[in-house]
Each structure stands twice: as C-alpha cells, then as structure tokens.
Image (tube, rainbow, N blue to C red):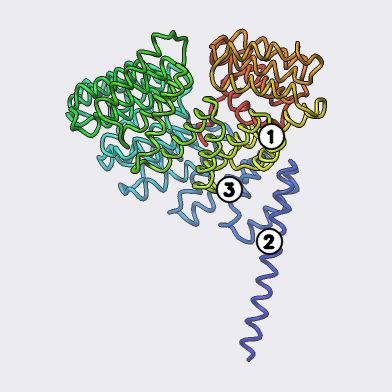
Amino acid sequence: MKYSFWLIVLLLALSTSLHAQDNDLQLARQYTSNGELQKAADIYQRLYKQDNETYFSLYTDNLIGLKKFDEAESAAKKMMRKYPAENQYAITLGKIYTEQGRADKANDVYSDLVKKLPAQPGAISSLATQFYQAENFDLAIKILQQGRKQLQNEQLFAMELISLYRIKRDKAALTEEYLNLLTVNPMYFNQAQNTLATVYQGEADYDLLRVALLKRLQKDPQQIIYTNLLTWQYLQQKEYDQALNQAIALNRRQSNNGNDIFDLCQTLVANGAYDAAIRGYEYLLTKNTRTDELYIPSKIELVNTKNLKITSGKYVQEDLLSLEKDYTDLLTEFGRTANTAFAMQKLANLQAFKLHKLNEAQKLLEEAVNIKTLRPQLMAGCKLDLGDVYLINNQPWEATLIYSQVEKAYAGTPMAQDANYRNAKLSYYTGDFKWAKGQLNVLKAATSQLIANDALNLSLLIADNLVADTAGNALKMYARADLLIFAEQPNKAMLTLDSIDKKFPGNALQDDILMAKARLFLQKKEYQAAAVNLKEIVANHPADLWADDAVYMLGTIYEEQLNDKEAAKTYFQKIITDYPGSVWIGNARKHFRILRGDKADSAS
C-alpha cells in the first residue's frame, strides 16, 4: 500500500515538472520570436541543466544568437565527450565555428567526421541527413558522393541527392542525377518531368537538358528513356516538329503499333500544333493497315485535327467543303457505326453551323442516335447536338423533347443541367421569358460553374430588360439576334442588332448589344473590332452585367490573338482589383501570374 502511495506521489511530481518545463519552453520561444534573446537564455540554460539531450539544440542556438560562442563551444564539446558516437554534437560544433568566422576549425571538425565514416549505407545516409537538418547542404552532398565511392555504387542515394540539388537549385547536377537514375529506374520518368518542369525557368535550362541527352544518346543510342525525355523537352520548348521527329524515330526502331505516337498527336492537338499532329496521324496511317486497332482512330483524329486547323483560323468556303468531303469519305470507307459516330457528330456540326446544311446535319444526327451500341456519353452529346439543330432548323418542339430526354436520362448530372440550360435558352429564344427565367433561377445553383454563371447572366438580362419594357419587345428582337449568333449567321445577326435601337429607341440593351457584336466579331476572327466593342462596355458600363466578362475577354484577346502581353496583364489585373467577385477571378490570377513571369517554388 505504501509503495502504491509513493508511486502516485512520484508520478504527480513528474507530471508537474513536465508541465512546468512545457510552460517554460513556450515562454522561451515567445521571447525568441520577439527578439528578447537574453530573457530566453535564462530559461534555456535552466532547461538545459535539467535535460542536456532534449534542450541542447535550443540552448546552443540561443547562445549563437547572443554570440556567446565560447559557452556554446564548451557545451558542444561536453556533449561530444559524453556521447562520442553521436554525430549531431560535432555538427553543432562545426556550426558554432562557422558562425564565429573560424571556417578552418569547422572544416577540421567536418573532415574528421567524414574520415570516420563507416562504409555502411545506413550510417552514410544518417550523417548526410544530419547535415541536411543543419542546413549544411554542401557537406550532405559531399558525404553522399563519398559514400558512393566507398561502396563502389554510383546508383546509391539518388533520391537524397535529387532532393539536395533541388534545394540548392543546382540544375546541372539535378539533371545529371535524374538521367543516371532513369537508366536503371524508368518508373521515375513522370517524377523527373514534373520536378524538372518546376525547376527549369527558361530556354537555357531546357537547352542544358537537351545537350546532356544528346551526349548520352551518342554513347547509348538504344536507351529509350533518353529519347522519350528528349521528346518531352522539345514539347516544353514548343518545338513540336522536333518532338514528333524524335518519337517517330524511336517508333521505327521499336516497330510497335504506335500508341506513343497517337498519344503524342493528341498532346500536339491540345497545344494547337495542328500541322505536326496531322503529320503524326498520317505516319500512323502509313504504318498500320485497316485491320490494326489504331487505323480507324487515326483516320478519324486526322480529319478532326484538320477540322480544328481550319475552323480555328481564317477559312473560305472551299476549306469547309474539302473538310466535309474528308468526313464523308471516312464514313463511306468505314460505315456509320458506333466506332465512327464521333465522326458523324463532327460532320453534322460542320454541316449545321459552318455550311448551314441543316437538313443533312439533322438526318445524320438522327441516324447517330439510333445506333444502339453507342456509348451513353456520346449518345447524350449527339442528342444535345440534334436538339440544337432542331432549334435552328425551326423545330423548337422537337428540340425541347430531345433536351428533356437527356435531362431525364442523366438526372442529377452536369449533362442533365446542360440539357436543362438549353431548354431554358430555347424558351428565351422563342420569347417565353417567364418560363425561361424560372428554369434559369434553378440553374444558378448548378454544380457546373460555367452553366451557373451563364444561367445567372441570362436571368439578369431578362429581369433587367423586363423592368423597362414589360412586354419585352426589344428583348424579343435581341433574343432573335442571339439565336442567329448561335446559328453562326453573323450578317443576319448584325442587321438585327442594328435594328433594335431604330425600332425601340431608349431600350435598356446597350451593353448587351455591344457584347453581342463583340461575340460576332470574335466568330469572324476580327479581334480588333471585337476589342473596340468590349472596351466601350468597360468604359461606359463598368457596373453592368457584362463588365467583368468584357474585361476578361479583352485580357484573353490581347494575350492569345493580338500578342500584346502588357495590355493582357493590365486587363487581368483589372479583374483582380475591380471585380474580385467575378467568376473569372481564378483564371485571371493564373494568367496574370504567368504573364508576370512567376515561377513555382522549386523547393515546394
């Protein structure tokens, strides 16, 4: 019983002591953060006397801060004598000498540690880690490199050295270390790409990688990982033809089916390198036969890429007709099946919106949605497109029926919200503003931010204009122009927009008309004209519905089309400062930082 009593007393005393130490430590840290080092010193000295090992680093760091080097040196040497096998105390002694300006003494201490280093991977790694924790990165690297020599293995400690080179921003050493690692561990290829992309800051860095890779390829041309990394490097520098050349050269040596080329072509398309992608798909078609699995996908993607190339720039009617023939030939060759339905969808959109062959487009999409084995997502996309064609082909009842089919089949998904939004817009186009607004108010809470924002804008457009004109006559005329813009009939749309002010003077649609005209000019690739209208919105309607959209659109036009980075930066900054609640705020920040030249923290 007595034993139990005294044990409880002892435990209570120990608990009280530990609690007091914690309070003292927090107070000392507070003094240190406030710059009151002497007040902290009294506490650290008391704690150090109670527990040398636990409070050694805090105590000596405080002494170094107070420049009491002799006391710090004495404490370090005392612990070295007490624990001769523990390297941390010698490392601290070297740090004290360094802070004191006695680099020769510090080097002696460190050299002694390195000399005594046993030829054991664990011991070498442990010592390097201790130098890393002491922020002596150069010595940590030196120890790991010496460990490799001692153990006669140049592959050891690769990840530790990569981390250290990254912290030191030693790009040349980091590059070589990754190249050494990848030859034996190709699984680190994606990590190497991600790391190098964050560390490299310009053309010179990528040139460094290219030179290193070419040297290695001269010695070892069969090393596939080098060729793959060289392809990636060319992509980073936007040398798309060179990237494709490397990939094709490797593919010829390997004699595989070309999945790597197919994937690369999709990357090229995503970067707008249409000519290089077309060349890649054409290579795959010469390499594969009709029975190969990549033949049909390559043929389809070749035509799709030609589509993107033509429609993303200035084009004439002959370009569109040539593209239509490519799609028609493809469907004649392979038939109209689930495998080619994507091409049917693309051809129908070309016919409906570019060539205005509405009946042909409608027939093609009706055929596509009757293919029983169509993937659900593709089926829904074809149905939504068919609804759009019904709409512009003056069949609104058929359009609303098929939109409703998609909404019901995909209830609760973004696809259903898209269908619902198209139904609401149909009512807006046909002048049923009350029903449209009711649907749009529901869609303002859509999970898709883009649909939610579009629904909000259209709802506000309707509400604002019905206040001034309860019959909505001017708005009905504007909605007809909006439908013509959607149908890509710019000349008719412009005539309708110009007629609104003449027929309904004093209407409340001034900023809306300017935005509609800007969209028309963008449709026709007339970027300067679009900018003029958008600037008028910014200048004369800074608090109206389209103000933040106009500012953001100006930023993208100047960045991507007019190649005026300073003007683009100004508009993106204006979104950040003047419209912090805009849906475009996140994108504006991203574009602004890139234009300003910000780089990701390489050590993060």
In front of the other: label 1 or label 3? 1
Compared with 320, 376 (above or below) is below
| Sequence order check, earlier mark of 3 and 2 | 2
Q: Where residue 89 appears, x then y in whole percent?
A: 51, 49
Residue type at tag 1: Leu
Q: Which residue is mark 3?
A: 74
Marks 3/2: CA–CA distance: 24 Å
Residue shown at 62% from the left, 8% from the top: 529
Q: Which residue is mark 1?
A: 456
Compared with 90, 300 (above or below) is above
Marks 2/1: CA–CA distance: 59 Å
Q: Are marks 1 and 3 in contact (CB under 8 Å)?
A: no
The answer to whether residue 86 of the structure is visible from this angle is yes
Quarter-of-image position of residue 256: top left
Residue shown at 27% from the left, 18% from the top: 245
- Residue 366's label in the rendered image is none
Q: Where residue 481 appears, x then y in whole percent?
A: 64, 19
| Sequence order check, earlier mark of 2 and 1 | 2
Q: Residues within 10 Å of mark 2 (few under 14, many from 20)?
A: some
Left-right relation of 536 to 347: right
The answer to whether residue 93 of the structure is visible from this angle is no
What kind of element bears circle 3?
Answer: helix
Q: Nearer the viewer, residue 351 or 6?
A: 351
Residue type at tag 2: Gln
Q: Where residue 14 appears, x then y in whole percent?
A: 65, 71
Residue shown at 73% from the left, 26% from the top: 545
| Sequence order check, earlier mark of 1 and 3 | 3
Q: Residues within 10 Å of mark 3 (few under 14, many from 20)?
A: few
Quarter-of-image position of residue 285: top left
Q: Which residue is mark 2?
A: 21
